[in-house]
Image (tube, rainbow, N blue to C red):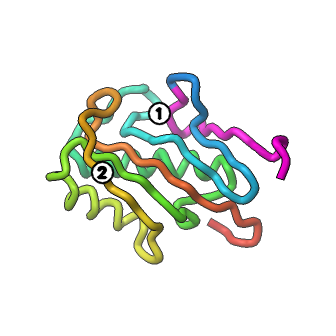
Amino acid sequence: MSCHDKKVYQSAEAPAAIGPYSVATGAAVFVFTAGQTPIDPKTGDLIPGGIEAQTRQVLTNLEAVLRSSGSCLKNAVKTTVYLRDMQDFAAMNKVYGEFFPSEPPARTTVAVAGLPKNALVEIEVIAVRCNDQEC
């Protein structure tokens, strides 16, 4: 692999980066996403609702970002979930399971002191791109 193999990805269906970082980058067969928060890509605002609605939006945003790279959540191999309150774990986990009904990726979940725009959840993904595997 050479430095020229690195690619940067962005989707019009997911929020754009709001700082000096890429929404997703790829190298070889891997795609690494930045953490996604529950931002509505059309308005740029945090979506209303509790942890379930916010988790659903985060995973929808991640699906769009991965799609722009030629991957999808089905090809996720590792996720990291950041929760503002670990009391939200069960509700987040319920929605998370809807997006990963079988063969879920490895996952780490941690509680954090705060998230951008006071979000309740942020998730990042490492996925693989497989030319011979449809998403």
Q: Is residue 7 magenta?
A: yes
**Left or right placement of residue 75 versus residue 44 in this view:** right
Q: Is residue 116 above or below residue 100?
A: above
Query: At label 1, which amino acid type do we have?
Result: Pro
Q: Amino acid at mark 2?
A: Val
Q: Where does the image place residue 99, in percent across and percent down from the top left?
A: 41, 63
Q: Residues within 10 Å of mark 1 (few under 14, many from 20)?
A: some
Q: Are marks 2 and 1 in contact (CB under 8 Å)?
A: no
Label of residue 128 in the image: none
Q: Which residues are magenta?
A: 1-17
Dot 1 falls on a residue whose secondary structure is loop
Q: Nearer the viewer, residue 48 or 21?
A: 21
User: In the image, what residue occupies the spot 44% across and 71% down?
Assistant: 104
Quadrant of the rendered image containing residue 74:
bottom right
Q: Please give the residue where the numbered disc 2 appears in the rendered image.
A: 110
In x, y percent, where is residue 23?
57, 37
Which of these two is toward me, 57 or 92?
92
| Horizontal side of residue 111 vs 104, given as left or right | left
Mark 1 — residue?
A: 41
Determine the main secondary structure of the stretch shown in magenta.
loop
Tell me, yes or no, whether the highlighted magenta stretch contains residue 119: no
